[in-house]
């Protein structure tokens, strides 16, 4: 299963808010966005990949609960990366002090940083 990449430029350049709203309006689809503004529609995973992703999430959540210094997220979470892309890693973790420094809106939408594992 391959992702579908759509080049919107020069016809359209989505703002962060527009990209967020497209994701909210199409919850059955998984979107990502490259740093150059290309829209990526991700296919669903198969059983093997889904099981591996679940194990990754389980392990990072167990570690996060035991460690207590950060907060972890599953593969459905999209993050705003430093160079402008919006991606959903298989698993992610943020130091608790950095998470707590975010505004409520940043926590609710696509948080602006992440350590990708």
Image: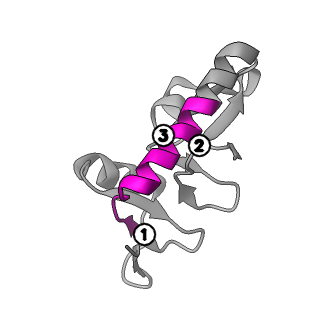
- Indicate which disc, 1 or 2, sits on the residue closer to the N terminus: 1
- Indicate which disc, 3 or 1, sits on the residue closer to the N terminus: 1
| Residue 115 image-quadrant placement | top right
Q: CA distance from mark 3 to mark 1?
A: 22 Å
Say above or below: 58 vs 20: above
Q: Residue at x 55, y 49 (%)?
A: 90
* Secondary structure mostly taken by the magenta-highlighted segment of the chain: helix
Q: Is residue 60 visible?
A: yes
Q: Of tags 1 and 2, which is closer to the observer?
A: 2
The quadrant in which the N terminus is found is bottom left
Marking on residue 91: 2
How many residues crowd around disc 3 within 10 Å: few (fewer than 14), some, or many (20 or more)? some
The residue beneath circle 1 is: 40
Q: Of tags 3 and 2, which is closer to the observer?
A: 3
Q: Which residues are magenta?
A: 40-59
Q: Residue at x 58, y 61 (%)?
A: 85
Q: Is residue 68 visible?
A: no
Q: Circle 3 sits in a helix, a strand or a loop, which is it?
A: helix
- Please report contact status of discs 3 and 2: CB closer than 8 Å, yes or no: no
Q: CA distance from mark 1 to mark 2?
A: 19 Å
- Indicate which disc, 3 or 2, sits on the residue closer to the N terminus: 3
How many residues crowd around disc 2 within 10 Å: few (fewer than 14), some, or many (20 or more)? many
Q: Residue at x 57, y 51 (%)?
A: 89
Say above or below: 2 vs 66: below
Q: Nearer the viewer, residue 115 or 53?
A: 53
- Please report contact status of discs 1 and 2: CB closer than 8 Å, yes or no: no
The residue beneath circle 3 is: 54
Q: Residue at x 46, y 61 (%)?
A: 32
Marking on residue 90: none
């Amino acid at each position: 299963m391959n992702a579908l990449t759509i080049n919107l430029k020069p016809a359209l350049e989505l703002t962060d808010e527009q990209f967020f709203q497209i994701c909210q309006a199409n919850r059955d689809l998984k979107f990502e966005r490259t740093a150059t503004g290309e829209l990526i529609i991700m296919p669903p995973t198969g059983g093997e990949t889904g099981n591996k992703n679940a194990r990754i999430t389980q392990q990072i959540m167990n570690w996060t609960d035991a460690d207590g210094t950060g907060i972890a997220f599953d593969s459905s979470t999209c993050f705003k990366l430093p160079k402008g892309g919006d991606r959903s890693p298989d698993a992610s973790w943020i130091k608790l002090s950095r998470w707590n420094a975010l505004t409520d809106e940043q926590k609710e939408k696509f948080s602006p940083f992440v350590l990708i594992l």
